[in-house]
Amino acid sequence: MPLSASNVRRTLLLTGASRGIGHATVKRFSAAGWRVITCSRHAFPENCPWEMGPEDHIQVDLANPANTNAAIAEIKQRLPNKTLDALVNNAAISPKSDGGGRLGSLDTSRDTWEHVFQVNFFAPIMLARGLIEELKNAKGSVVNVTSIAGSRVHPFAGAAYATSKAALASLTREMAHDFGQLGIRVNAIAPGEIDTAILSPGTDKIVEQQIPMRRLGAPDEVAKIIYVLCTEASSYVNGAEIAIDGGQHV
């Protein structure tokens, strides 16, 4: 007996799935019965708990446009029904100086600017445009992961990272306008200080002095909002950027 439209298993494509917010997002969608195709620079880690991980993992260097296009072609092959219900652009890089400090606008090399923008800005639009027919067929949703650093100078996030996230926020609005006419919703989330392995020294001071809730956010608290933006619960939300920062910028 064929599955009804409401019973067809949905598919998520997620970049940057190997840790932190990405890892939590895979677990959140998998628990809800979604098929999750993951993308990262690394091979599939054996300790990951979700179903069909190695078979639904694509190793791709998003800093390389040719490799990104090759990955898009492979993803299409893995979507036999030619539908993609959600694309979450989570992968990002934030280079530091040799001493681990912040790279400002005066000391960031051109190569670093280009590398960061290719991963953080160009790869998301390449993926969305490359898979637009599959998203259109599913009336799908795109979620771009920006950052609170995209709207204010951050003590740890570098200039290239911050400006790439600001550009991605603006791109989200443009995509919402253009993709929305095809039935595809495009939104963004802007996480603040989230409890992951890449927190910088000194984050405890930000928590103590700037966050009204006086704690870090949990990766699953971000994943839950991503999930809402990919389901009918947000069916008329398009072009929004939702801050998940505990009130840090109120």
Image (cartoon, grey):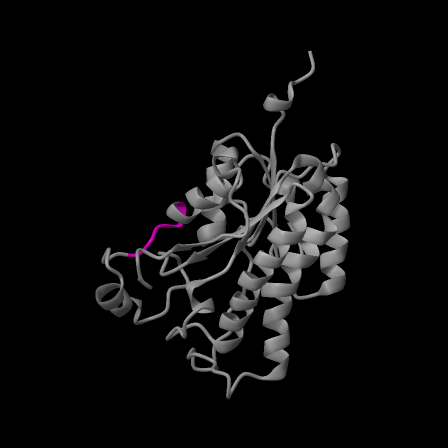
Q: Tell me the quarter of the picture where residue 152 sits.
A: bottom left
Residue at the image position 72 percent from the left and 47 percent from the top: 131
Q: Quadrant of the N terminus?
A: top right
**Residue at (49% x, 31% y) in the render:** 32
Residue 31 appearing in the image: yes
Task: Confirm whether residue 62 shows in the render.
Answer: no
Residue 222, horizontal then vertical, whole percent: 41, 49
Residue 162 is left or right of residue 117, and the answer is left
> Eyeballing the image, is 160 above or below 122?
below
The quadrant the C terminus occupies is: bottom left
| Viewer-closest of 243 and 177 | 177
Magenta residue span: 216-220
Residue at the outermost bottom position: 106
Quarter-of-image position of residue 211: bottom left
Specify whether residue 218 is painted magenta: yes
Q: Could you tell me residue 205's position as x and y percent? A: 25, 69
Look at the magenta stretch and give its main secondary structure. loop
**Residue found 53% across the figure and 72% down from its top:** 163
Q: Position of residue 63 (x, y in %)?
A: 66, 66
Query: Residue shown at 37%/69% (left/top)?
Result: 200
Residue closest to the eye, 59 or 206: 206
- Return the x and y of residue 135 as percentages of the image width and height: 68, 42
